[in-house]
Image (cartoon, rainbow, N blue to C red):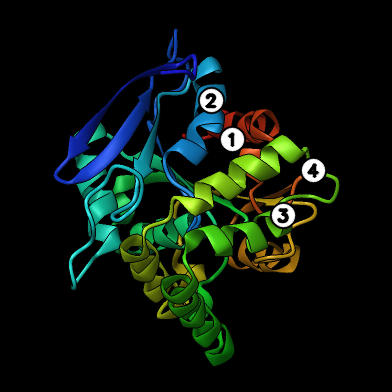
Amino acid sequence: MTIGSMTGSTFVGGLHVVQHQPPQRVFDPVVLILHGIGGSARSSAHVASELADRGVHAWCLDAAGYGESADPGTEHDAVADVLRVADAISPDRPLVLLGTSWGGVVALATALARPERIAGLVLADSTRGSGATPEKAESMRARSRDLAERGSAVIAAERAPRLLAPGADPKMVETVRASMSALRHSGFAAAAEFMASTDHGPRLGEVTCPTLVLVGKHDVVTGVNESHLLAESIPGAQFRSIPDAGHVAIQEQPAAAAALVTNFLEHLT
């Protein structure tokens, strides 16, 4: 309970969710934050706290096989997990999904599957999915095999610095490295397969909810161009760049990200 706004956590089935309750609620929609493939609910905590300080009721999900959540089954459905949690934390009202990287791909899939449950989307440093090309799909599956063979600590040490902006605070690099070092192969493998088998490109025009696309100015993982593509292809989507941030922009610059998200929420009907 080190983050100021954190008011507790609970389990929905085997899924762990952490609540950040605002001192005074200003915005109506609940925001559910979906972490990236190398993160967890903990890596979303600071942006959730910043949102709560601005009057947003925010929740952070540990995806199946991540953090304190149970491992996924063989026929895992990430969208069903999000909807199960949504029904528990916001049963009577649509909610906003804030998905970063892989979490954004899951958020898009959820909005396409159940548009009536989603009041808005925030896609941070995200993508159409690795299934957009055979090469990207194979690269994602290869990452899963590499993690199984060499372990999360080795992968984290190699990959963490690339996720942040040049000259990033070494403490933040270490935070990202530590988060990735805690990865379990069960969760990562399920997430990687979801990414590898998904290409939202042909369906982006079907997204009906208000959408904000955020990207770190120095993102070289999914890349700035991919975020531009999302914003240009989703009807009415807004695009915002976050300075001094790389691929983990909401973790690297949580205050700037939260300010952009709350501005987006102000204009939701």
For label 4, the residue is 168
As measured in the structure, the alpha-carbon distance from the residue carrying label 2 to the one carrying label 3 is: 26 Å
Answer few, some or many: residues within 10 Å of disc 4's Cα (few below 14, many 20 plus, some between 14 and 19): some
For label 2, the residue is 51
Q: Position of residue 193 (x, y in %)?
A: 38, 75
Closer to the camera, 246 or 23?
246
As measured in the structure, the alpha-carbon distance from the residue carrying label 1 to the one carrying label 4 is: 23 Å
Q: Looking at the image, do the residues carrying marks 3 and 4 touch, with CB atoms under 8 Å apart?
A: yes
For label 1, the residue is 261
Q: Looking at the image, do the residues carrying marks 2 and 4 touch, with CB atoms under 8 Å apart?
A: no
As measured in the structure, the alpha-carbon distance from the residue carrying label 1 to the one carrying label 3 is: 26 Å
Q: Position of residue 17 (x, y in %)?
A: 30, 36
Q: Looking at the image, do the residues carrying marks 1 and 2 touch, with CB atoms under 8 Å apart?
A: yes
Which amino acid, mark 2?
Leu
From the viewer's perspective, tell me whether residue 256 is left or right of residue 1.
Answer: right
- Image depth: mark 1 or mark 2 in front: 2
Q: Position of residue 230 (x, y in %)?
A: 61, 65
Q: Residue 90: in sight, yes or no?
A: no
Which amino acid, mark 4?
Ala
Say which residue appears at 24% left-offset and 53% top-offset: 81
- Image depth: mark 2 or mark 3 in front: 3
- Image depth: mark 1 or mark 3 in front: 3
Considering every residue shown, the one lying at the far right of the view is: 167
Q: Quadrant of the N terminus?
A: top left
Q: Position of residue 99 (x, y in %)?
A: 48, 50
For label 3, the residue is 161
Which amino acid, mark 3?
Pro
